[in-house]
Amino acid sequence: MTLLADFVLLVHFAITVFLVLGMLLIPLGAYWHWSWVRARRMRQIHAGLMALIAIEAVFNITCPLTVLEALLRHAAAPESFWADQLSKILYWNLPLEFFMILYVCCVIWILYLWKSVPPRNRT
């Protein structure tokens, strides 16, 4: 089960990297005229995931990936080095209000990017 829990942690980390890099690379890509930053499907997934995370934070819902990982680990700490390092990056020991404000600000930023760097319309 530990290997499966590590896989869930890796997926969770990959989603986080996707969201953070998207928030940074979309405005840079608009400046540098990278066409992929205007890909509608990628932008929909990006905005949808961030909105879901913000809704979870506002309503104090634990992320399903966090719950699944904890169930697979039986609430034990990661045993492998890389899983431990990814856990330290993902799970910050801060008040829930911090995350709620952070995620809502991220949604506002993504909505701003949607308006200022609109995705391509389907043709």
Image (cartoon, grey):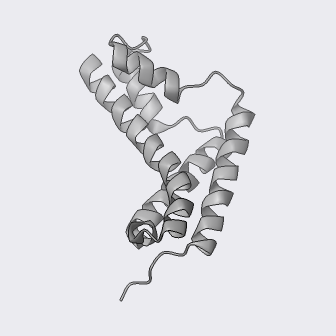
Q: As drawn, is 53 to the left or to the right of 35?
A: right
Farthest residue, direction front: 32
- Would you place residue 85 above or below residue 18 in this image? above
Q: As drawn, is 121 to the left or to the right of 82?
A: right
Q: Can residue 67 be spotted in the picture? A: yes
- Would you place residue 33 above or below residue 11 in this image? below
Q: Position of residue 97 (x, y in %)?
A: 74, 35
Nearest the eye: 45 or 74: 45
Q: Position of residue 102 (x, y in %)?
A: 68, 43
Q: Position of residue 52 (x, y in %)?
A: 54, 52
Q: Position of residue 57 (x, y in %)?
A: 64, 42
Nearest the eye: 98 or 55: 98
Identified at 51% across, 26% down, the residue is: 89
Q: Can residue 1 be spotted in the picture? A: no
How many dots with numbers? Answer: 0
Identified at 55% across, 54% down, the residue is: 23
Quadrant for the C terminus, please.
bottom left
Identified at 54% across, 26% down, the residue is: 91
Quadrant for the N terminus, please.
top left
Identified at 59% across, 44% down, the residue is: 56
